[in-house]
Image (cartoon, rainbow, N blue to C red):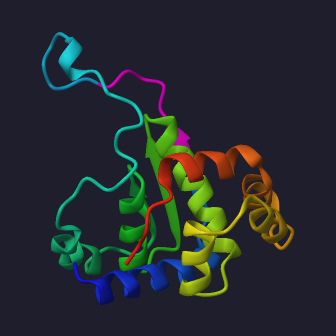
Amino acid sequence: MGGNDRAEIVEKIRQKIKRFLIVSVALTTPCYSQASVPSAESKPTLGIYLPPNEQHPAVAIPIYRKSNHGVYVSVGTERSFIGAALTRAQALYVIDYDLLAVRFAKVNRALLAASTDRADYANLRLTASQDVWRQRSQRLTGEDKETLASPDSWAFWDKRVSVPIA
């Protein structure tokens, strides 16, 4: 996926977030492989998949284009937002066993809601201070306002997520 394709996807995500209802859920059910007896190898390692782990997400574009455009259901972090942007989904439902992935979705949703365009989103995501997040939170309502105003959200993002986007 080239830089220009990624820029278009980020802008689509930012534009669509205004109408998305994003529900983030963490499953408490243990997740195991298809083996009948769980082993130490099959237990999930929480917090290791914050960056996308697919090497070529653009391969799924033909599938996204054929979607029914209702609710986009996904696991993971970036892939949820990318998939939703590539469909005409009216809602995004993020579900994951990893509380860090769920936290990522909540903070990213708030950043997208607070941004005015792609460049503003990139600034909020990559370089904005905790004070800027708090100021921007005043423009929001509900969970997005609470999430963006929280010092814990900024610390989480700064420590675990803040990586450049193309």
Q: Residue at horizontal 43%, vertical 34%?
A: 97
Left/right of residue 151 with respect to residue 44 in the rendered view = right
Magenta-tinted stretch: 24-31
Magenta segment: does it hold 142? no
Residue 13: percent from the left, percent from the top? 49, 77
Q: Residue at horizontal 15%, vertical 25%?
A: 34
- Compare residues 36 and 117 and report the one nearer the observer: 117
Residue 23: percent from the left, percent from the top? 58, 53
Q: Quadrant of the N terminus?
A: bottom left
- Compare residues 17 and 45 and report the one nearer the observer: 45
Residue 137: percent from the left, percent from the top? 80, 65
The number of discs equals: 0
Main secondary structure of the magenta stretch: loop
Magenta segment: does it hold 26? yes
Q: Residue at horizontal 49%, vertical 53%?
A: 161
Q: Quadrant of the C terminus?
A: bottom left
